Amino acid sequence: MAELGKVKRVIEKSLPVSEVLLVIDATTGQNGITQAKIFTEAVDVTGLIVTKLDGSARGGVALAIENALDIPIKFVGTGEAESDFAAFDSERYISGLIGE
């Protein structure tokens, strides 16, 4: 994590960093909260990207992270194509989470 913080500091010498996105695999489970806490301590994460929402994973850990650390979900990935990457839509996410 120290190296991650160092990378951010080096980049900021050239230009300001206004966004730090943490990519969380939807299959991560509750371990994702611990990961997010550690990353946030190192680089002040400003948003989440949740990937692999195309399978059976519901990505509930993203809501837990958002709630515990006040980090918004900004994007989701539902596949491997560029068209499978989209801005987060809370209504669509909740519908998928509860199986509607």
Image (spheres, helix red, strand yellow):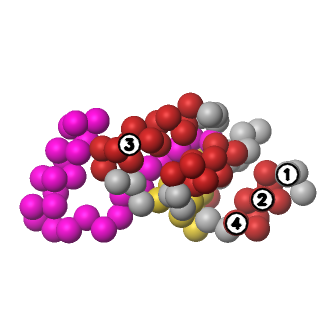
Question: How far apart in space, not on screen, are marks 4 and 2 (Cα)?
Answer: 6 Å
SS under mark 3: helix
- Amino acid found under the numbered disc labelled 2: Ile
Of badges 3 and 1, nearer the viewer stands 3
The image quadrant that residue 87 belongs to is bottom right
Residue lying farthest right?
100
At 19% across and 47% down in the image, what residue appears? 7
Residue drawn at 22 percent across, 36 percent down: 2
Q: Quadrant of residue 12?
A: bottom left
Task: Estimate the spatial distance between the alpha carbons at disc 4 and disc 3, rounded to whole Å.
Answer: 24 Å
Residues drawn in magenta: 1-26
Magenta stretch encompasses residue 8: yes
Report the residue at 79% width, 51% height from top: 97
Which residue has dot 4 on it?
A: 90
Q: Which residue is mark 2?
A: 94
Q: CA distance from mark 3 to mark 2?
A: 26 Å
Give the mark nearest the N terminus, 3 or 1.
Answer: 3
Badge 3 is on which residue?
39
- The residues bearing labels 2 and 1 have C-alpha atoms spaced at a distance of 6 Å
Please give left or right for residue 84 compared with residue 47 in the image: right
* Image coords of residue 67 (percent x, y): 61, 53
